[in-house]
Amino acid sequence: MVDITRKEPTVREARASGKISLKEETIALIKKNAIEKGDVFAVARVAAIQAVKRTSEIVPLCHPIPVEHVSVDFEVGEHEVSVAVSVKTTAKTGVEMEALTG
C-alpha cells in the first residue's frame, strides 16, 4: 500500500462512466418501469453506492477513506443505458477506484 501519511487532506473528486448494451425490448420495459423485479435504477443506484463505500474491501491495496458524496446517474438510449458515478471526499488520497467500483 502506498504511504500517504505525509500527505495533507484535500478535496478529491472522480467520475467514472460506461454504457450497458441491452435489447430494445429490455429498454422498452425499463422505460415503462415494467421490469418484474421492480425499479432497476433504484436498485442499481443503491448497489453502486454500497460498492463505492466498500471499495477498500473489494480492491486490493486501496486505502479505506471516508466517502462524503456519491451520485449515480442514468441515461436511457435506444440500445443502451449510460451510467455515471461521481464520488467526492476530503482525504489524503483520491477516489478514482471508488468511482470505478460504483
Image (cartoon, rainbow, N blue to C red):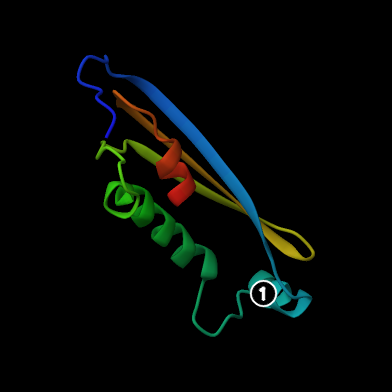
Q: Residues within 10 Å of mark 1 (few under 14, many from 20)?
A: few
Q: Is residue 48 left or right of residue 16?
A: left
Q: Can residue 96 be seen in this snapshot? A: yes
Instruction: Using the image, determine if residue 71 lies above or below residue 68.
Output: below
Q: Can residue 102 be seen in this snapshot? A: no
Which amino acid, mark 1? Lys
Instruction: Using the image, determine if residue 14 lies above or below residue 97.
Output: above
Observer-nearest residue: 58 or 41? 58
Q: How many marks?
A: 1
Q: Residue at x 51, y 71 (%)?
A: 39
Give how far across and how far down residue 92 sits, in percent: 29, 23
SS category of the residue bearing label 1: loop
Instruction: Using the image, determine if residue 101 lies above or below residue 35.
Output: above
Which residue is farthest bottom? 36
Q: Residue at x 79, y 64 (%)?
A: 78
Q: Residue at x 53, y 70 (%)?
A: 40
Give how far across and how far down residue 1 sits, in percent: 27, 35
Which quarter of the figure has residue 7? Answer: top left
Observer-nearest residue: 19 or 78? 19
Q: Is residue 64 left or right of residue 30?
A: left
Give how far across and how far down residue 49 sits, in percent: 38, 52
Give how far across and how far down residue 84 sits, in percent: 57, 47
Which residue is farthest front? 1
Check disc 1 and report the residue beneath it. 32
